[in-house]
Image (spheres, coloured by chain):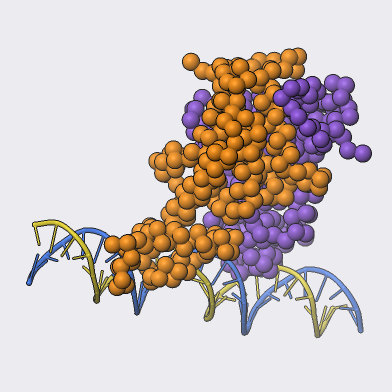
Chain colours: A purple, B orange, C yellow, D blue
Amino acid sequence: MTQARCNYHHGDLSNALITAAAELIERDGTLDFTMAEAAAKAGVSAAAPYRHFASKEELLRAVRDLAFLGLDHAAMETLEAHEAGSLEGILALGHTYLAFAREKRAFFSLMWEDRGDSAERRLEAQSKYGGFGVLVNMVQTFCEKQGSGDIDALYFATQIWSLAHGIATLEANQMLDLFDASIQPEHLLDDGARTMLAGILNPAVGTTPKRAGMQKRA
Amino acid sequence: MTQARCNYHHGDLSNALITAAAELIERDGTLDFTMAEAAAKAGVSAAAPYRHFASKEELLRAVRDLAFLGLDHAAMETLEAHEAGSLEGILALGHTYLAFAREKRAFFSLMWEDRGDSAERRLEAQSKYGGFGVLVNMVQTFCEKQGSGDIDALYFATQIWSLAHGIATLEANQMLDLFDASIQPEHLLDDGARTMLAGILNPAVGTTPKRAGMQKRA
DNA sequence: TCGCCAATGTAAATAATATTTACATTGAAT
DNA sequence: ATTCAATGTAAATATTATTTACATTGGCGA
């Protein structure tokens, strides 16, 4: 059932192909492996993949889902390694994000490239993305601990995620050190996240006009 | 000289191809035009492009440069439309960035996709990217006006750019409204930028340990 | 148990493109 | 006027994705 001893019928080709593709991407650092390569790596003919994926695009979408799982996993690990709702934990989660982007470059960009998938496909993938939920919880707990439990953690987590994402992307494009080679991505993120969190707990006066939407919604 | 009346020699094929490619990208919203299409649009044979670009990748790199110019241009316009060093101007620049990402989706992603170009090529492209410089100046002037002229504007501009970039990217991937459809990209950015700027002028106490690198370098 | 079938594989086309090759044209400098 | 380097063209090539027509097989109902 698991591993057929005779060949012809592979038994789990779909997953084998996803894995093969992921390995080729990892090896080459690009997405331009060929279907034939992936098939060969899984031990089948070049046409076989099409019994499981309508196109290379679809295989790539499956690999992307795997990448999201990987990021989720890293987030969970980070979560468990730190005290709930600690500033330290939030920053560590950011570092995990930057490290993932750096170490799994090709996968990270695959995750955010436009693969023209259907709205349903996207929704499904998104609903599985738990990494962001981890951040939301951390921010929520952080605020509660600081006595500001009525803050809209989802909103601020989104802001912090955006910052982390931007830093990761710009770093990948060597744009962060455009005019200053000494800028450190993690420092930039730590610093920004701290400022944001401080801003939440202690809304700035003077410089800040309207601040609608900062409080938790009903 | 500009427009040869006889054909055969086009006169300015290189640019014509870049324009043709840009138009095809604009029209289809994707990068998968064919070299033959672009060539036809420029009125030449399918092989002609290779006298000017070694590969489709290289043509795409040229289009990317054009996209950067477009963003620069938008930034300049925004700069001129607002008072120097005003908070309003900084926020408007952010809106320009988000609008560009939204309206020139395909170009925006082309700008940040890995096209595997050489370090020199990238340096050259980067050095031309003036949009970021506009932001740096705005932040610098803003700080001076607020009496904090010794702040490292480059550092904080990078932080704000990162935030804007992350928001733009996540929005393009429909990730911003993952759990809350009411989140508005521009609001998120305005809010974050305000918090950051407030944080600069009035460094938070209590929540913020080490803050190395926040002051202007010597 | 036997025979059928849907699922899954295979080898051999197809098709779409990028890219190369061998040859043509042309404007400009000598 | 001649020649050459640059620039074009048409006709290969090469590489892949994808399809087609046929093969194998495991499981399921009779």
Q: What residue lies at 88% left-to-right and 21% top-to-bottom?
A: A147
Q: Where is residue B145 in the image (x, y as percent from the top left)?
A: 60, 21
Residue B43 shows in this picture = yes
Q: Quadrant of residue A216?
A: top right
Which one is in front, A38 or A123? A123
Q: Is residue B63 left or right of residue A163?
A: left
Q: Is residue B110 left or right of residue A122?
A: left
Q: What residue lies at 71% left-to-right and 25% top-to-bottom?
A: A207
Q: How many labels does the image show?
A: 0
Residue A198 shows in this picture = no
Q: Is residue A67 left or right of residue A210?
A: left
Q: What residue lies at 81% left-to-right and 47% top-to-bottom?
A: B181
Q: What residue lies at 52% left-to-right and 64% top-to-bottom?
A: B24
Is residue B114 shown above or below D23? above
Q: Where is residue A50 in the image (x, y as percent from the top left)?
A: 65, 68
Q: Position of residue B143 (x, y in %)?
A: 60, 22
Is residue A122 shown above or below A92? below
Q: Indicate the quadrant containing the N terminus of chain B: top left, top right, bottom left or bottom right.
A: bottom left
Q: Position of residue A146 (x, y in %)?
A: 84, 21
Q: Is residue A32 left or right of residue A186?
A: left
Which one is in front, A24 or B187? B187
Is residue A98 shown above or below B42? above
Q: Quadrant of residue C20?
A: bottom left
